[in-house]
């Protein structure tokens, strides 16, 4: 099962939800897909979906998935990392009115650089990222998660002080 999550931001994330729905409709994605669409205006036609759910339910969906496709929010990425899942992150971008700034872009780039996730910056590359993700082994990131977060927060703090 593929779990797609756009988090709880007030902005719509049609770009991601539409693309996943399109890939399912065209037959390129054959797995079961569950999409958390949040405040997204577009409602999928080819997948199970819901707007919001409890954090326990989100953790359960992460745990039971083979792949998590997420926005670039730290909380969603960390939850998937806790379960050692393959992660594709599509950052919300200011230029598409998906967020107020590009902080998700910075986070995704940094985590991809550290080989923790696959970043997708052009939505037309999502299918290739899915194919690539299935060639990777799942990792148990639980033990390394606190170290990673500490390092990331230190880097972020230094960047903010500049």
Image: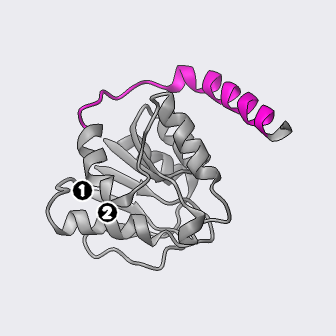
The disc placed on residue 160 is none
Which corner quadrant of the image does residue 106 belong to?
top right
Residue 6 position in % (x across, y down): 50, 60
Q: Which residues are magenta?
A: 134-159
The disc placed on residue 32 is 1
Residue nearer the viewer, 44 or 104: 104
Residue nearer the viewer, 96 or 25: 96
Residue 29 position in % (x across, y down): 20, 56
Provide the secondary structure element on which disc 2 rests.
helix
Distance from the alpha carbon under mark 2 to that under mark 1: 12 Å
The disc placed on residue 20 is 2
Assess whether residue 137 is covered by the magenta stretch.
Answer: yes
Assess whether residue 146 is covered by the magenta stretch.
Answer: yes
Q: Which residue is rendered at x = 52% and y = 25% of the image?
A: 142
Residue 73 position in % (x across, y down): 58, 51
Q: Residues within 10 Å of mark 1 (few under 14, many from 20)?
A: few
Residue 150 visible to an observer of this rendering: yes
Residue 86 position in % (x across, y down): 37, 37
Q: Which residue is rendered at x = 48% and y = 35% of the image?
A: 112
Q: Which residue is rendered at x = 79% and y = 32% of the image?
A: 158
On the picture, is 23 further left or further right than 62? left
Is the residue 136 above or below the residue 98 in the image?
above
On the picture, is 86 further left or further right than 12? left
Which corner quadrant of the image does residue 11 belong to?
bottom right
Provide the secondary structure element on which disc 1 rests.
loop
Residue nearer the viewer, 64 or 44: 44
């Amino acid at each position: 099962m593929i779990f797609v999550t756009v988090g709880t931001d007030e902005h719509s994330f049609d770009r991601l939800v539409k693309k996943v729905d399109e890939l399912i409709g065209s037959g390129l994605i054959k797995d079961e897909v569950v999409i958390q669409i949040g405040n997204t205006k577009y409602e999928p036609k080819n997948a199970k979906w819901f707007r919001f759910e409890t954090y326990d339910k989100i953790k359960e969906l992460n745990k039971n998935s083979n792949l998590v496709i997420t926005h670039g929010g730290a909380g969603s990425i960390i939850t998937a990392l806790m379960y050692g899942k393959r992660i594709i992150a599509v950052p919300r971008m200011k230029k598409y009115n998906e967020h107020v700034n590009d902080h998700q872009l910075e986070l995704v780039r940094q985590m991809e650089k550290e080989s923790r996730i696959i970043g997708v910056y052009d939505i037309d590359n999502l299918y290739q990222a899915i194919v690539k993700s299935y060639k990777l082994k799942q990792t148990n990131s639980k033990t390394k998660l606190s170290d990673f977060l500490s390092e990331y927060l230190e880097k972020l703090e230094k960047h903010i002080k500049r």
